[in-house]
Image (cartoon, helix red, strand yellow):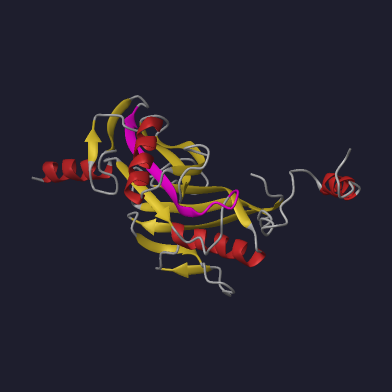
Amino acid sequence: MSGKPREHVVVANYGWFLFNAVPIVCGNSRKGASFPWVFFRDEVTTDIVHARLTDYASRKGANVAELNLYINDNVLFEVPGTSIPIPMPYVLCYKERLVSALLIDPPPPPPPPGEETAVGNDAQKNEVKRLLGNIPDGGVK
Amino acid sequence: MKSLSAIMACALLFAGCASIRHSTSFNGVKVEDNEEPLEIVEVENSGWELFKFIPLASGNPLKPNRFSCRWFTDTVTLQNNLNLLEMEMKSKGATRFTNLTSRNSEETFLFILITRNAYHTSAVLLKGVPSKDVSK
């Protein structure tokens, strides 16, 4: 990773499902939504959280590094306030999709042909130019 | 008949599952050192165990995303996840990947009586011909 890191971004959505398939309630993924939840609609998908993160990176004009996808599907529902699960799995299930990444500066564009110089920092390149400029036309004798 | 139905229901409930999920929504954004990404992939293989060591059922790594499992066999391993990742890479024609991470998750019922164990592996598949290394 050569770009300078700008910010660490995490995008996640989670929700509750009946029999691991029928959505009950989950986070509202629409931009500018006034209500944070949606009912009976599945918006806990990889595409939605991934698209939201890359859309944010695109608006910031940044590249993405350390991109990780985290999926959590719990099929044993626990009695609230305890760690006691109900004996039937896959009745009430919890799903979570999370994408995390580091936004980095995109690498600088390559120099146009004809202006390529030797590898080195700007101070070294300027010094080389100054020294080459002092050589007379007939060369060093 | 009722007991057979109950057995079938239990078998369905405690069957394992192997799945591959992916997303290609990159919106033109490049990854790492201006690499062109193909897709982000998450491989999951899960299984059920009795007392945390007797395997009941687990996903079939040869048939991901299908209703297929292996009975009384533990296939929830890192190697199987990497095999599934390789399968996905071959199907998409990818030869390189980056940001490879793996983790384990666990849910238990009645302490250690029944445990659902899952192994997750995530990676970003890259386009193009390898310039230096096969994998980044």
Pick out the residue farthest to the right: A134
Of residue A136 and residue A61, the one placed in the foreground of this image is: A136
Of residue A107 and residue A16, the one placed in the foreground of this image is: A107
Where is residue B71 shown, x and y percent of the image? Answer: 22, 33
The answer to whether A46 is drawn above or below residue A79 in the figure is below
Q: Residue at x 34, y 46 (%)?
A: B19
Where is residue A93 shown, x and y percent of the image? Answer: 40, 52
- The reply to whether residue B113 is in sight is yes
> Is residue B25 left or right of B113 when viewed as pictured?
right
How many labels were placed on the picture?
A: 0
Q: Residue at x 12, y 45 (%)?
A: B2
> Is residue A100 left or right of B118 when viewed as pictured?
right
The answer to whether B16 is drawn above or below residue A32 in the figure is above
Pick out the residue farthest to the left: B1
Q: Magenta stretch containing residue B47, yes or no? A: yes
Q: Residue at x 8, y 45 (%)?
A: B1
The answer to whether A69 is drawn above or below residue A33 in the figure is above
Quadrant for residue B15, please give it: top left
Of residue B10 and residue A66, the one placed in the foreground of this image is: A66
Magenta stretch, residue numbers: B32-50
- The reply to whether residue A44 is in sight is no
Instruction: Give the prevailing secondary structure in the magenta stretch.
Output: strand
Where is residue A137 shown, x and y percent of the image? Answer: 86, 50
Where is residue B31 shown, x and y percent of the image? Answer: 56, 52
Q: Magenta stretch containing residue B118, yes or no? A: no
The answer to whether A21 is drawn above or below residue B55 in the figure is below
